[in-house]
Image (tube, coloured by chain):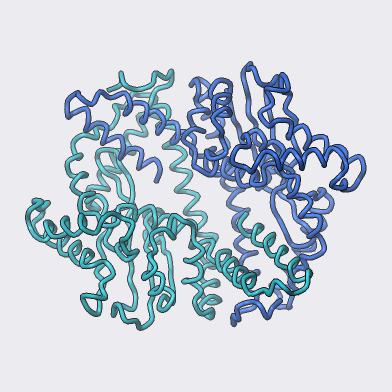
Chain colours: A blue, B cyan
Amino acid sequence: MSDDKMEIPVSYSKLQELEDDFEEVEVELLRHQAKLTGDLYEKRAKVIAEIPNFWPLVLEQSPSDIDEYIQPTDSAVLLNSLTDLSVDRFELASGGDPRSISITFTFSENEYFSDKTLEKKFWWRCAKDGWAGLVSEPVKINWKSKDKDLTQGMLDLVCQLRAAEQAAGKKLDDDAEPKKSLIAQMESSGGIGGVSFFAWFGFCGRNISAEESKEAFKEEQAKRQKRKAGEEVPEDDEDEDDDDDDDEYETEIFPTADDVAVCIAEDVWPNAIKYFITAMEQDALSDIDFEESDEEMEEADGEEHASKKRKA
Amino acid sequence: MSDDKMEIPVSYSKLQELEDDFEEVEVELLRHQAKLTGDLYEKRAKVIAEIPNFWPLVLEQSPSDIDEYIQPTDSAVLLNSLTDLSVDRFELASGGDPRSISITFTFSENEYFSDKTLEKKFWWRCAKDGWAGLVSEPVKINWKSKDKDLTQGMLDLVCQLRAAEQAAGKKLDDDAEPKKSLIAQMESSGGIGGVSFFAWFGFCGRNISAEESKEAFKEEQAKRQKRKAGEEVPEDDEDEDDDDDDDEYETEIFPTADDVAVCIAEDVWPNAIKYFITAMEQDALSDIDFEESDEEMEEADGEEHASKKRKA
């Protein structure tokens, strides 16, 4: 394959070594950030608990990376019943990876599902082929009836498939139930465009156990030591698991759920007050009677600058 | 205007106090990050100096926030002559604000301009009306001839206007030269769509002197102290400077230059190696002969996962 690559006078190892160093700093900064912001997030939680519709308004202002997945029905459900949202880097306390994220949604009584909270956990895992990223487990939602199921049964099928595969200790064949139904359902639902945001709770990602990840991490650290010592380290052999990977994407009802989780944790969560203030300002602007005095118009201008500051 | 706002049971002061606290942490984290990454960026600079076209390839892979401003001609100029790019948080060393950014482009001999380096500085400044953000000075580019000027004379006019206004110590009237020509030129160039990326060097932003910023910062700190002490602080009166602001946007040939600078500093610069590796992988993928063995196809799959990791 190296024949197909651009010829560059620097080895892949050299670039990878730099990336490894940057990654270590990034993780260190996440730890430091958590230390500095912990009390602030607690203080914030108390203040925003008093504001009705805080989180639905924040989500409405959220970047398109998230907003594009919120269908009109989802939006109505969230606006009427989302009472709290919280992000936790849950492995930090035990000295684990700060990139593992749990996101908890709290709901009031609603006509769609009976769950009071839905928590989705994403674990930062390493694979022996050199991959690293977030993996998760599907979260069951207790829909009040079949026609209230915003995922049209897909989330249930994912949960069943996961349970069946864990019981069997291996992947199911494509024509075994519930996999067959799930694939058929996914094909008929016609692409991500119309899939409910609640399908996000069904994301699995690669199937990597904590043990496998631990071993892979150790191997990776050993490689890094070698690179630092100037030894040539062979590129990761990424072939072996390809078949598995294909399977995993085939039954993934929300393939970009990990990116959405990172966006919630790194943008929506830290910038929630900024988004909320923007929502309030837009509300104020839309309420202004444009036949009123110029003065009032100028105030609106001023607000635009204020929001610019908060986005900076 | 408070009548126009959504009624919320939490005071604006309370939310602003939280935002102030988060902002302080953010600045502290930028300082810490600079400390942890300084040596790494030096090490990286040495490695990538050996790779031809490193920065043009990185810019080609850069997020749409930047890519959308790079016109085909710009792209050709960058690919043929951009030899280095560097980002410096230049006020840090003297204990200043880590949000002030300087971005330096280094070029080889080319047919468009004679400058070897173009440095654009953005200062983090506070205004008395409560605004805070990045301001800059226009950077002259020495075009080799009139028809090589990628901004069709607009950048020169901005530089002249800035000099004239600084000499006069006040804003020029709209019908005074060179302002009149600049506005006419901007109107005829028909929107941002076709404007060269090099117009980015013309951004000014709000006209706030270092002294004004210092005073405004002191006032802001005093307000924060009051908020923390539980005293009610009036909302910033953002009316007074509105007229000025309007003027400033009127002659801004690249109004989002500050956002682009932040994107370069916070995304392109730290993730440069990731973008470069993606560029190499795309090159490898496009070179694969699809009639070759399945094995080779699977290797390409593996690469997709590798790039996912690096983006995580």
Q: Is residue A271 above or below residue B14?
A: below
Quadrant in which residue B24 is drawn: top left
Q: Could you tell me residue A24's position as x and y percent?
A: 64, 59
- Disc count in the image? 0
Considering every residue shown, the one lying at the far right of the view is A168
Which residue lies at the image location 59% right of the left edge and 80% below the top edge?
A: A8
- For the residue pair B58 and A52, the one nearer the viewer reads as B58
- For the residue pair B219 and B135, the one nearer the viewer reads as B135
Considering every residue shown, the one lying at the far front of the view is A188
B127 to the left or right of A272 = left
Q: Could you tell me residue A46's position as x and y percent?
A: 53, 24
Q: Quadrant of the N terminus of chain A?
A: bottom right
Which residue lies at the image location 39% right of the left edge and 57% below the top edge?
A: B261
B141 to the left or right of A34 = left
- For the residue pair B74 and B135, the one nearer the viewer reads as B74
Quadrant in which residue A4 is drawn: bottom right
Q: Could you tell me residue A29's position as x and y percent?
A: 58, 52
B254 to the left or right of A239 = left
Q: Is residue A174 above or below residue B52?
A: above
Q: Could you tell me residue A250's position as x and y percent?
A: 75, 48
Q: Is residue B58 above or below residue B232?
A: below
